[in-house]
Each structure stands twice: as structure tokens, then as C-alpha cells.
Image (cartoon, helix red, strand yellow):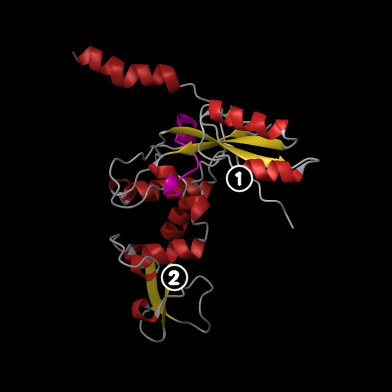
Amino acid sequence: MLLVSWSAFVLAPQLQLGGAKQVPVLNSTEVYPHTRPGEANQGLQVYRANGCAACHTEQVQQDGVACDVVLASAGKNPDAVSNLLATLTLRGLSQEAAQAVSDKITAAGGKVETHIVAVGPDIARGWGLRHSVAEDFLYDNLVQFGSLRIGPDLAGVGSRLPDANWQLLHLYAPQSVVKGSLMPPFRYLFTTRKIGAAPSPDALNLPKEFAPADGYEVVPKPEAKELVAYLLNLHADVPLYDAPFTPVVVAKP
């Protein structure tokens, strides 16, 4: 029984993932993932040491994919295409339905693109653009999957909350930026000290109810900066062959 358990939980994963390497990004010449910068890698150890995985996961779940049909050009008969679009459903389609809609618009003279969209509760919450895959954790040691969501999933927190100052405020006084937050403050990662000849450029700009006494300031310790560097480095927002989606590109004015 011991041998069977060891084979299932140690040997099999090692054979499957032990030689994992960077993989190509879908429709790109780039590879994924990049190694984490040194400060972010140190922040992973701070994340681990403070037990953040007890309340947060780093694994976005996905139910499946849908197709959105996007009009690229109305062609030479815009009125006919416009009238046709008013009768069609363009979002959340199966592949077969998307193809049928595309054929109708093309027959009317329009040009379309079909976008792959990941779907599921985690995606709808804005926690990620696709489900988490093994490549996302290639350079993490130890991997902090987590199993409980008292707080939101953090797999894509660097994309949705990219402000380092916000992250520092959240660590020091969570309720200062998230009303009603259940997260405990990590104030031991900061130093409260008297203001010298001039305020420190690193001092937190805290709301009055969370600010220290007059003449004092709160500055982050190196561990706080490292933890924030790690959080800002959590993206998992590139399309892969085993986790595809179509990025939405906003045209520049």
C-alpha cells in the first residue's frame, strides 16, 4: 500500500511534470512563464511564511469555453449586415453556433472574427481570464495552491490590482481599502517611527482612522515590499495551447 501510494502521489506527478519547461504562447513567438524577479521570488517565501495560502487560493477554475462573434467590418452592405445583427445572438455561443452565425454575416457581406472566451464562476468574478495550468507554477517553490477561499483567488491579482501602494495599504489595514474585509492586518511587516527631517517617500498615505499619531509615519519593512512584489507578479493572463482564450485588444485612439 505504501508503494502504491508513493507511486500515485510522488512518482506519477514527477514523471508527468518533472520535466516541464516553458511553453509557447498561443499565436505568439513568446514563451511562458518568465522566471520571477528576485524580489518577487523572496516574496513567495514571505507569502508562505505568513500562511496566506490558508485563506487564499491560486488556482482559477473554469467550466468550459464559449465563442463570441465580433464584427470586424460591415463590408459594402452595412444596412443589411446591421439588420441581420439585430436578429442574431453573438455572445456565449457553441463552436457550431458561432460558425453558423459567422456564415450568415459573411453571406450578407460582413467580415467577422470568432473569439474564444473562458467561462465559469471564477472567470465571471474577474479572478482570471482562463483556468490555471501547470505552467503557471513552473518557477514557484513551494507552490501555494491553497484549498480555502476566505479571501479571493490570487492567481491574477497582479493584473487586476497592479498598484503597489494599494497592496501595501491592504496589508497594513485591509479595511482601509476594502470595506468590511475579514483579512487580519499584517502590521508587523511595517515600522511605525517618528518622522525625521522629512517624511519618508515610502510612508503609507493612510486614512485618518488608520493613521499613526501626529509626528509618526508607517513605512514597510523589506518583507512587505517583497510580498507585494510577489503579488504583483501573479498574472497568469496569457493564452496557452492547453488554456486558450482570445485576448481583447483595445484600439489606441
Amino acid type assigned to the residue bearing label 2 in the image: Val
- Residue 97 screen position, x and y as percent: 54, 29
The residue lying at 41 percent from left, 86 percent from top is 215
Amino acid type assigned to the residue bearing label 1 in the image: Ala
Q: Which residue is mark 1?
A: 86
- SS assignment for the magenta stretch, majority: loop
Q: Which residue is mark 2?
A: 219
Residue sticking out furthest to the bottom: 214
Q: What separation in Å lies between label 2 and label 1 (alpha carbons)?
A: 56 Å
Say which quarter of the image contains residue 221.
bottom left
Position of residue 200 relative to residue 128, above or below, is below
Residue 181 visible at all: yes
Is 131 covered by the magenta stretch? yes
Where disc 2 sits, the SS reads strand
Where disc 1 sits, the SS reads loop
- Residue 100 screen position, x and y as percent: 60, 28
Is 45 covered by the magenta stretch? no
Q: Which residues are magenta?
A: 124-139
The N terminus sits in image quarter: top left
The residue lying at 37 percent from left, 70 percent from top is 176
Neighbours of disc 1 within 10 Å: few (<14), some (14-19), many (20+): few
- Residue 24 screen position, x and y as percent: 61, 29
Comparing marks 2 and 1, which lies closer to the viewer?
1
- Residue 204 screen position, x and y as percent: 45, 72
Residue 229 visible at all: no
- For residue 176, side relative to residue 76 (left or right): left
